[in-house]
Amino acid sequence: MSDPVMAALRDASWYSRPDTRAPKRYHVMMDDGRPACGGAMFLVEPVPAERVPEPSRCKRPGCISRWPSPAGEA
């Protein structure tokens, strides 16, 4: 059995003025801890990717192709 696909929110606290207005997206984590979409960001709070609701998923190339089906879907 393979390891579950994990997803995480980004840590934007290192920005001088992080955007706090828009809902945040989860990004699929690669084995080295970087986001699959290639964004320059630190990822925190990993969760199993299948638990992330569709509207909260990153839609960028890289992440979008790696999202598993949500729990309960076949």
Image (cartoon, helix red, strand yellow):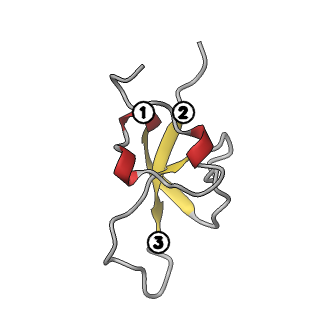
Under mark 1, the amino acid is Glu
State the residue lying farthest toward the front.
Answer: 74
Near mark 1 (Cα within 10 A), the count class, few <14, some 14-19 or many ≥20, is some
Q: Which mark is residue 69?
A: none
Q: Helix, strand, or loop for circle 3?
A: loop
The mark nearer the N terminus, 3 or 1, is 3
Residue assigned mark 2: 5
Which residue is found at the position 33% from the left and 22% from the top?
72
Which residue is found at the position 50% from the left and 32% from the top?
68
Calculate the distance from the C-alpha at mark 2 to the C-alpha at mark 1: 8 Å
Q: Are marks 2 and 1 in contact (CB under 8 Å)?
A: yes
* 39 versus 73 height, above or below: below
Which residue is found at the position 64% from the left and 43% from the top?
30
Residue assigned mark 1: 50
Percent coordinates x, y for residue 31 in the rendering:
66, 39
Percent coordinates x, y for residue 19 in the rendering:
39, 79
Which residue is found at the position 50% from the left and 81% from the top?
15
Calculate the distance from the C-alpha at mark 3 to the C-alpha at mark 1: 23 Å
Under mark 2, the amino acid is Val
Residue assigned mark 3: 12
Q: Quadrant of residue 13?
A: bottom left
Q: Helix, strand, or loop for circle 1?
A: helix
Whether residue 22 appears in this view of the structure is yes
Q: Are marks 3 and 2 in contact (CB under 8 Å)?
A: no
Q: Quadrant of residue 47?
A: top left
Give the foreground label among 3 and 1: 1
